[in-house]
């Protein structure tokens, strides 16, 4: 942008040259930054439990069925897919990813995080917003473990927004549901992880208001993070070891639990 400044302005108002230099530099800088921001695409990555409506949510945001969805015995999304679109005049790039596995072990979780890393790389320089998808009626141990794994990454924490899908299955008002989510003891850690950012979604209707609401929160996340994004380098050897420990830990606890039960039953027989 060219800024026209007449030399007469300067001489007639008897203001120092430094003042004018600062004034115009600031104005020029802000204008340049603002126009750059305007052009920059909002980069959104979606991740969640397998079958929780990740791809459906991506379609709802885009406003078209660009991602494959469905309910099958095996995961429908098996690789990351990127689409570009415009949402309420904002250029958006969106990535759908294979979800966090239903069958949890070190291998399946590692595979899920390898795909996630690939999704980050496909969205170079990285996502501004990380949408974590969960069905509203199901906050299981699997979801908790997924959040525990993601919680190891501070960068994800700063960019995450939780989307609860299947709002249509809830038989009460939207406001009451929101209040219930906020008050829920079992969702406390999840909401802490997301700094309280969550949205309720119904992917069965084409209500653009829910998308508008989400976009507003996404813009706040971008502003708060000064347009910084999450770098795929957060997924490294160290983080993989940490995650394996979490997943293994779960197995150990479960094993210990079964052993305890077994021992107590045996005791019953002995007595
Ligand atoms: N009632 C209802 N069903 C939904 C909603 N969102 C998704 N579904 C259904 O849930 C099923 C799974 O949806 P997907 O979007 O394919 O889920 P996903 O998480 O991408 O699944 P995978 O790719 O297999 O991991 C489909 O039958 C969707 O129609 C929703 O808001 N309400
Ligand atoms: Mg999917």
Image (cartoon, helix red, strand yellow):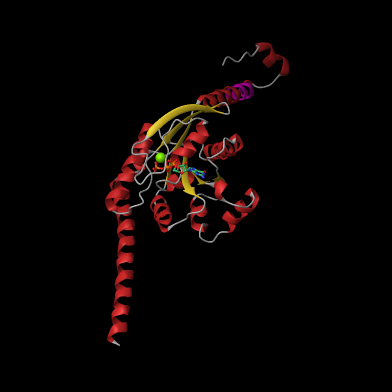
- Residue 123, visible in the rendered structure: no
Q: Main secondary structure of the magenta part?
A: helix
| The residue stretch that appears in magenta | 18-25
Image coordinates of residue 4 in percent, x first then y, are 62, 13
Residue beneath the point at 72% across and 14% down: 12
For the residue pair 19 and 143, the one nearer the viewer reads as: 143
Is residue 122 depicted above or below 17 in this figure?
A: below
For the residue pair 51 and 81, the one nearer the viewer reads as: 51
Magenta span contains residue 190: no
Q: Quadrant of the image for the N terminus?
A: top right
Residue beneath the point at 44% across and 57% down: 140
Magenta span contains residue 24: yes
- Residue 250, visible in the rendered structure: yes
Image coordinates of residue 98 in percent, x first then y, are 37, 41
Image coordinates of residue 90 in percent, x first then y, are 55, 28
For the residue pair 224 and 146, the one nearer the viewer reads as: 146
Image coordinates of residue 178 in percent, x first then y, are 60, 51
For the residue pair 189 and 236, the one nearer the viewer reads as: 189
Residue beneath the point at 49% across and 39% down: 57
Q: Is residue 249 left or right of residue 184?
A: left
Q: Which image quadrant for residue 23? A: top right
Is residue 10 depicted above or below 144 in this figure?
A: above
Residue beneath the point at 65% across and 50% down: 175
């Amino acid at each position: 942008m060219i800024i026209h400044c007449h030399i007469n302005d300067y001489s007639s108002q008897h203001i120092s040259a430094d003042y004018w230099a600062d004034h115009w530099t600031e104005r020029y800088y802000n204008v340049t930054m603002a126009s750059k921001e305007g052009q920059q695409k909002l980069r959104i990555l979606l991740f969640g439990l397998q079958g929780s409506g990740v791809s459906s949510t991506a379609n709802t945001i885009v406003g078209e069925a660009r991602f494959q969805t469905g309910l099958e015995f095996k995961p429908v999304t098996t690789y990351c897919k990127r689409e570009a679109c415009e949402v309420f005049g904002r250029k958006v790039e969106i990535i759908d990813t294979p979800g966090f596995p239903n069958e949890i072990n070190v291998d399946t979780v590692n595979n899920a995080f390898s795909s996630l890393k690939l999704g980050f790389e496909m969205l170079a320089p990285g996502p501004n917003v990380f949408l974590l998808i969960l069905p509203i009626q199901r906050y299981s141990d699997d979801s908790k473990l997924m959040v525990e794994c993601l919680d190891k990454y501070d960068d994800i924490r700063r960019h995450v927004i939780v989307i609860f899908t299947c709002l249509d299955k809830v038989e009460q008002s939207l406001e009451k549901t929101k209040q219930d989510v906020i008050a829920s003891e079992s969702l406390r850690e999840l909401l802490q992880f997301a700094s309280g950012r969550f949205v309720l979604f119904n992917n069965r209707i084409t209500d653009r208001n829910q998308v508008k609401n989400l976009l507003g929160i996404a813009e706040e996340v971008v502003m708060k993070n000064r347009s910084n994004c999450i770098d795929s380098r957060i997924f490294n050897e160290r983080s993989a070891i940490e995650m394996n420990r979490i997943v293994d830990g779960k197995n150990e606890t479960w094993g210990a639990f079964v052993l305890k039960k077994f021992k107590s039953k045996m005791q019953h027989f002995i007595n």
